[in-house]
Amino acid sequence: MNVEKAINSKAHVKAIAQALLVTFLWSISWVLIKIGLRESLPPLTFAGLRYTLAFLCLLPFVLTNPHHRAGLRSISHQKYVQLFILGVVFYAVTQGAQFVGLAYLPAATLTLLLNLSPIFVALIGISFSHESSSMVQWGGIFLSTIGVIIYFLPLNIPASQIFGLSVAIMGVVANSISSLLGRRINHQSGLSPIIVTFVSMGVGGLLLLITGVLTQGFGKISPNEWLIIGWLAVVNTAFAFTLWNNSLQTLTAVESSVINNTMLPQIAILAWLFLDEPLSTRQVTGIILVGVGTLTVQLSRYLPISLKLPGKQS
């Protein structure tokens, strides 16, 4: 029994380490994207290249695996439509908005806004589904709202950032919708996560690439820029996705939520170190409040039912 506990404990620590490594890689992505954009990579084309190459990296692993091939053959027309919509919303719109937003906004500002996605998901759940709300959930929403207000006050947004903020808000809404859609597909479709990602990423990545080339051109990509694109596609997307899903086989939903929320401070620190994007004490305070608020909302679903408030009933 002690040997079994020791093995389980070791596997758990390994899973935590893997998940933390993935969040670090995903946080580095923001720095690499900003560097690529500063070197004049067209945002949509840049995003399209990243996710199309990541899709191509997953291609041999899917096609050479009999179980994954069987999963592809089992997808019905209705499920393909759902995966197509997920690819459009999560990759083409959400990721496209992220790349365009980073061309106009500091990395910390954009990640703060995208970190509000759980708030939007919670509000959608309260308004349109049968999910009940809780005192803790509303407390998290209140904290995040105060954090955003503190971060952006005094409201003196440069004209050059207004477009970026508009695109970022669109990305937050799309990310929230894709979270709900992705949760539904993963829970009800019976498909493995890698198949869901493979198909939706292929749709969204190719759509992004075609749209980018047609509207922004391909640009002159230097060897350093190709290196950034390759690293983002192979390591920070294909490899990181595989490692994250592997960690989820051991971690609880609470643990994965906590670890995923470490990206907000990581990105802020990395942007300060490598992109010369310093933050004031007021902005740091806002980021902390948003991080605590969104984490509270995510964890509220695992609280005892006695803390729930009456919600919409069927």
Image (tube, grey):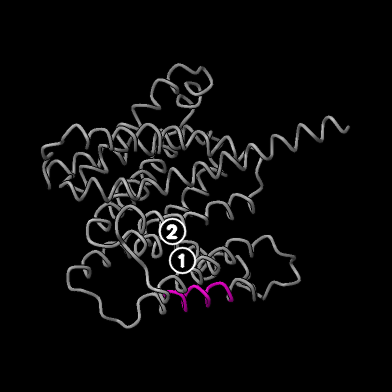
What segment is highlighted magenta in the picture? 139-148
Determine the residue located farthest toward the right in the rendered image: 1
Q: Residue at x 29, y 59 (%)?
A: 276
Q: Of label 2 and label 1, which has the lower sequence position? A: 1
Inspect the image, locate mark 2, and give the three-letter code of the amino acid beneath it.
Answer: Ser
- x and y percent of residue 208 in the render? 25, 43
- Residue 147 shown in magenta: yes
**Could you classify mark 2 by the number of other residues whose Cα lies within 10 Å: few (under 14), some (14-19), or many (20 or more)?**
many
Q: Quick check: 220 above or below 35? A: above
Q: In this rendering, is residue 111 above or below 198?
A: below
On the rendered structure, is 92 left or right of 238? left
Main SS, magenta region, reads: helix
Residues at marks 2 and 1, CA–CA distance in whole angstroms: 6 Å
Tag 2 residue: 176
Question: In the image shown, does 30 or 198 lie closer to the viewer?
Answer: 30
Question: Do the numbered discs 2 and 1 sit on residues whose CB atoms are within 8 Å?
Answer: yes
Q: Decide which of 59, 284 is in the foreground and name it.
A: 284
Q: Is residue 4 left or right of residue 272?
A: right
- Name the quarter where the N terminus is drawn: top right
Q: Residue at x 51, y 67 (%)?
A: 128
Does the magenta-highlighted stretch encompass residue 221? no
Q: Secondary structure at mark 1?
A: helix
* Image vertical order of residue 87 relative to residue 160, above or below: above
Q: Which mark is residue 120?
A: 1
User: In front: 26, or 179?
Assistant: 26
Q: Farthest bottom residue?
A: 154
